[in-house]
Structures are given as C-alpha cells and as structure tokens.
Amino acid sequence: MVARVSTTLTPTRVPSPARPAPRGRTRVLALPEARWALASTVAFLAALALDLGGLPWWAYGPLYAAAYATGGWEPALEGLRALRGRSLDVDLLMIVAALGAAAIGQVRDGALLIVIFATSGALEALATARTADSVRGLLDLAPSMATRVTEHGEETVPTSELTVGEDLLIRPGERIGADGRVLEGASEADQATITGEPLPVTKGPGDEVFAGTLNGTGVLRVRVERDPADSVIARIVTLVEEASRTKAPTQLFIEKVEQRYALGIVMATLAVFGVPLLFGAGLTDALLRAMTFMIVASPCAVVLATMPPLLSAIANAGRHGVLVKSAVAMERLGEVDAVALDKTGTLTEGTPEVSAVRPLPGSGLTPDALLALAAAAEHPSEHPLGRAVVRAARERGLRIADARGFAAVPGRGVTAVVRGRVIGVGRAGDRVTGSVDLGPDADAAGVPGTEDGDTVVLVTGDGVPLGTLALTDRLRPHAPATTAALTALTGTAPVLLTGDNARAATRVAEATGLVDVRADLLPEGKVDAVRQLQDAGRKVLFVGDGVNDAPALAAAHSGIAMGRAGSDLALETADAVVVRDELTTVPSVVRLSRAARRLVVQNLVIAGTFITGLVLWDLLGHLPLPLGVAGHEGSTVLVGLNGLRLLRESAWRSGQVPVQGTRG
C-alpha cells in the first residue's frame, strides 16, 4: 500500500509554476488567402505607381493583370461553385464588374475592386484560424500526463488513459489531471480558470477538484470521478466550438440583400445589352451601354458606404485602448440591448487587497503593529493572500521584521517566529496542524472565515488571537459609473454572472447598483444565463476575462474581453478586447458603434441615390462613359469621406462615461 499523504510541508518555498507554453498561433502568411491578397495588393500598388507616372501600357498592364489573377481567382472559383448550387452572391458580381471594367478600359477600377475583396477574404480566414488556435490551446491547460496510484506503487500515464475510480497523486505546483474528489491531503487549488474565484480555494478530503486547475503547496490524493473526455475543461472547449458553429453570423447590410441585388444587376445588364440588339442597335454600342450600366450599378459605393464608418470606428476605438476585431464585430456592438458582466477580473481587478485591520481588545496592538506582524510572518509566502498582506504593509510604510522558522500548512496558513513570538496567520476558524495551532480561541474571536464577501484571516501570537485582517477583491475604480452608463444605453441594468460565492457577488452588485445577481456558476451556467436572455428576444453583450467566460463570450450576440489579465481563449473568442482594462471604454465603444451604424444608413441613402440616378440616366438617355465613371467614383469618394468622420476625437468624446463621484 502507498503511504498516507502528509498534510504538512517542510518550510521551503515552492516556486510559482510557469504557464504552459502555448501552441503555435497561425501566422498571417501561413494562410493561402493572405498570400494571394498580399500578392494582389503589391501588384496593384506597383501598377498604380507606374500608371500615374505616365509610363506606357506595356510597363504596368501586366501588373494590373497579375492583380486581377492573384486576387480574383479564388472568389471567382467560390462564386462559380455557388452558381452551380443555384446561388448568386456579390463576390461573383464584383468579379464580373471588375472584368467588365477592364473590357471597356477601366482596368484600374476593376483591379481596386479585386484588391478590396481579396483583403477582406484574408482577414476573415485569419480570424477563423486564430479562433481555432485558441480553442486547441485551451486543451494545454489540462496536463498530458498524470501520476496514477495503484496497489503496486505509482506510475506516470497519459491523462487520456485515466478511468473513473482510479487514484491520482497531485504534487505541489502540478496541474490536476482529471475531475475528481480529494481522498487525502490538504492544499489549495487555483481554479479561477474554471469558476472565476479570485483566490485559491482550500481543498481537503471530500472536496471536488477540476482538471486543468493548479495545485498549491500541498500534496493531494484524488479519485477520478469523470472521464477525461467529459471533464469541465473539455466541456468548455465543446461549448465554445458549439456556440461558434451555431451562432448565426450577422452580415453587413449589403450582404443581407446581396442575392437579390446581384441577380437584379445581372439580369438588368443582360437586358441593357440584349434589348437594343433586338431593335437593330450595333453590337459595340450595345456592349458599351451594358458595360457602362455594369460600372454605374456596381456596388462599390454601397460597399464603401458600409466599411469606412465601421473601420473608422475601429481605428478610433483602437486609439483609446479597445481592439475591435472586424467590421462585423463593430456592427454587432451597436445592436446590443442587454449586458451581462463577469465579476472577477471584470468589475473587480482580480487581486486581493487588505480592506480592514482589526486588533482584538486586550492585544495591546495598533492596526499598524498587527499588520506589521502579519506581514513579517507572510513575507516568505508565495500565497496571493500573503503577498497582499505584505503589499499593504509596504504601502503604509511599515517596517517588516525578519522572521525565522517559516512554515506553510497547505490550506491552513503560515507560522513564523517574529521578534521571539510565534506568529500564525490563517483563515479564521482554521486549525494549523504543524508547529503551531491557531487554537480553539480562533472560534472565540467571533470572526467567520468570510464576512460580507471578504476573506478574513486571524493573526495569533504564541497561540493567542491578536486580531483579524479582512481581504477583498478590489473593485475597479469606475465600475459604478460603467454599470450606470450601460443601464442608460440599454434601458435595463446589467446582469452579474459569476462563479464566485453569493456573498462576494452581492457585495459587488450593491457597490455597482446591480440587482440581478447569479453566483456559483460554472461556464455552462453562464452560457445558459446568456441564452435565456437571448431566448427572451434580447441581444446580449457579455463582458468577461477568463477561460470560464469564453463559452459565454461565444454564445452572446457580442462579447468584450478584458485584455490585461484575460486568458488567451477569452481574448480570441471575444469580438473586442479592452487592452488597458479601462472599464469605462465598454459603454463608450457601444455608443461609437451605434454612431457608425447611423453613418452606414446615411451612406447607403447617398450611394443608393447616386446609383439610381446614374442607372436611370443610362437607361433613359445616353450617359457618356467618362461621366458615368465620374459619377460612380464621386459617390464612392463622398460616402468614404462621410464615413471617415468617425476618426475624429470628438466622435469618441461624445460617448465617454462621466466618472466624477464614483466609488472605488
């Protein structure tokens, strides 16, 4: 039989384990779409320079042809495949328009259309590849090997071979290999990636543990209770993949009507060409009129009516620390009418801080003296609570005395000799089974392990309670102002979705003015909450930061991730990333998106007016080709310049959140 796992550790420091090296991300030029788009762009720019430089056709003509070929062959092939399936899209129409432009001498305009569409396809391919990379990378959180305990000893086996009922040995600093329950030992597990809890959770016999979470300084013996393929971390991967597949893609306005538009233009062009022939018109004149019609009716202005406002909004948001990943993502942000917020790392900073220092009557200590003693004992500790205590003492300018005989008892606390006294620091009510016991007086101190959502630790001297320290997950400075702004934008207060306990969630909700609080949620619980809102007809914006938030980010109508401490999967799954963790930018970017959508509508009206006027002129009169091209290009330039208005600083300032008078 294997010896029982010890619940005490020698007084040594265990280094913080490094994050697993992520799998390689797909490089841009590894995608064939990106390589073809780059080749087309380079060829077009080179041809344009030679063309504008007055060189003869033979110098730049082959380069324009190369731009057509490299950028157009793939969308042309896809368009032909769609045509075989009795579907007509704008991609094929744009290829035909580009070829038509070349047929009547407007080679430059046609090449520009090709470059725009090739670049758009490359960006879409890159976004898809990066999302797939991040989903695969999530599996790296779960270790590939585990130590299995048998009646003959220990053996290292792949986690994929583990079965329900087997026992695992989890050493300090290792990631847990399977979902299970603790049989022996005591430690703490960092399971923020699964539940969103900001602090490591004490684990002892009977407690549940999750695959992929990080064991602390203790040794655990765990019995496997779920097949590795059905672990919580594996279910997160499945949820993200399913949500990404089933999420109906929001298309830009022109894409929603592209079937009818494309079919209408093709039929009209054929009619413009064929009808005059029936009445005796010459072939050249009929072809010239048809090609002119194709040029003036082509959706260049409509495409630019949509893209410049959205791209300008993306650029403006980027200058202010919000990375919006695509024009579609920017469009979706402006459609939301409900918001769901994660707590840890989103409304809060995810870092514990000392919120109160309370010496007990009769201890003879001031708050600073009590904090200095606790900091001296915690100074060698790697635990987040210990680091928070030391940081608080330093912020107050206190002198931290040297300590001897440091010992950490996993899940219980630390002890050390400070100025001749044995100082113990541990969660209130816990017992330290080591060189010092915090003693039965810990309960007599009358302080629970948590209080109003705070974590409370008891400080003892030679076994006698001296006082308590309260630690809390710090609220972001402008969280109340942000939730108020989001309430004003959508008409309803945001919903708080968190894996943390109900008391901690309620404290944050009260500080930020939220009413609907749903706590103790695993990742699938957050997804269910988001889908309930969407089933009620709401378009939900979810804001989160962790791996446990990724399924909800994927399931929501739109998702924003906090970038500074956000997990790779959350950052890839979200539609936008708040790079500097400035929470007030969330309502600001939603307002900016709504402004962009208003400009899109304006531009569509302008583009539609020009196209209608030019088409009617060509059909009812005689539109000279140079004038048709000028009108077409003029409308394109006009809508483009109108969209660029969102690049101005005033466009962002008009949506800024006032932060005066907010609470920290």
Image: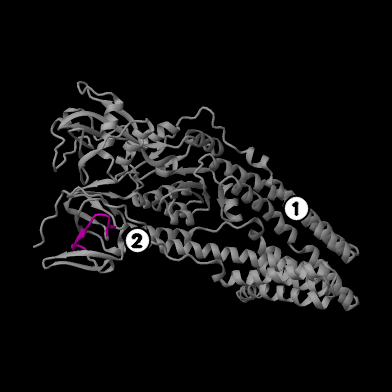
Front one among 251 and 352: 352
Front one among 568 and 252: 568
Q: Position of residue 59 (x, y in %)?
A: 80, 76
Q: Quadrant of the C terminus?
A: top left
Residue pointed to by mark 2: 234
Q: Is residue 471 visible?
A: yes
Kind of residue indicated by mark 1: Val
Q: Residue at x 40, y 58 (%)?
A: 239
Q: What element does badge 2 sit on?
A: helix
> Which quadrant holds residue 38?
bottom right
> Which quadrant holds residue 259?
bottom right
Could you tell whether 532 is left or right of 617 in the image?
left
Q: Position of residue 43 (x, y in %)?
A: 71, 72
265 magenta-colored: no
Check residue 639 in the rendering and tell me which mark sits there, or answer none. 1
Q: Position of residue 560 (x, y in %)?
A: 50, 49
Q: Which residues are magenta?
A: 164-176
Q: Does residue 487 sit above or below 133 in this rendering?
A: above
Q: Residue at x 48, y 61 (%)?
A: 131
Q: Does residue 200 sit above or below 305 in this rendering?
A: above
Instruction: Mark 2 and mark 1 in contact? Answer it, CB < 8 Å.
Output: no
Q: Is residue 268 visible?
A: no
Front one among 377 and 411: 377
Kind of residue indicated by mark 2: Ala
Could you tell whether 645 is left or right of 555 in the image?
right
